[in-house]
Image (tube, rainbow, N blue to C red):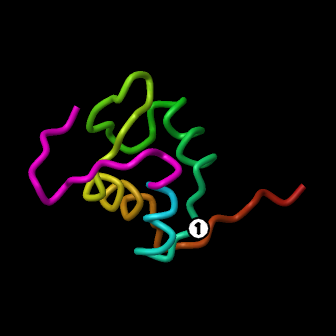
């Protein structure tokens, strides 16, 4: 888990985090994307838990989303 300061509060759920990334950074991230990445241990770092629900800091979500930007387009293999 990450350490928190007052700038990271309030924490957000995956759904709220996806909306935060879309609205703040303009990146096309959905809750489903975060779910899938988290299942593969590639998601944003969890700041804490409320029951079984993962909570995230906005700073960690921003850093995670920006780390997934690439400078080149992704090409699909031609079949």
Taken as a whole, is the magenta stretch helix, strand or loop? loop
Q: Mark 1 falls on what kind of element?
A: loop
- Observer-nearest residue: 57 or 40? 57
- In reply to whether residue 11 is colored magenta, the answer given is yes
The residue depicted at 43 percent of the width and 64 percent of the height is: 20
The residue depicted at 51 percent of the width and 63 percent of the height is: 19
Is residue 62 left or right of 23 when viewed as pictured?
Answer: left
Q: Vertically, is 50 above or below 36?
A: above
The spot of residue 44 in percent (x, y) is 38, 44
The residue depicted at 58 percent of the width and 49 percent of the height is: 31
Q: Quadrant of residue 76?
A: bottom right
The spot of residue 23 in percent (x, y) is 48, 74
Query: What stretch of residues is rendered in magenta?
Result: 1-16
Q: Vertically, is 1 above or below 61?
A: above
Q: Which residue is mark 1?
A: 28
Q: Across the whole image, how many numbered discs are drawn on residues?
A: 1
- Observer-nearest residue: 10 or 42? 10
Give the quarter of the figure containing the C terminus.
bottom right
Crowd band around label 1 with a 10 angstrom C-alpha radius: few (<14), some (14–19), many (20+)? few
Q: Vertically, is 44 above or below 20?
A: above
Residue lying farthest to the top in this orientation: 51
Residue lying farthest to the right in this orientation: 79
The residue depicted at 41 percent of the width and 59 percent of the height is: 65
Give the quarter of the figure containing the N terminus.
top left
Residue lying farthest to the left in this orientation: 5
């Amino acid at each position: 888990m990450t350490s928190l300061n007052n700038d990271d509060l309030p924490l957000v759920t995956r759904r709220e985090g996806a909306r935060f990334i879309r609205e703040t950074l303009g990146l096309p991230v959905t809750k489903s994307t975060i779910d899938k990445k988290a299942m593969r241990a590639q998601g944003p770092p969890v700041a804490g838990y409320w029951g079984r629900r993962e909570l995230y800091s906005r700073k960690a979500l921003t850093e995670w989303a920006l780390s997934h930007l690439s400078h080149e387009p992704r090409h699909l293999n031609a079949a």
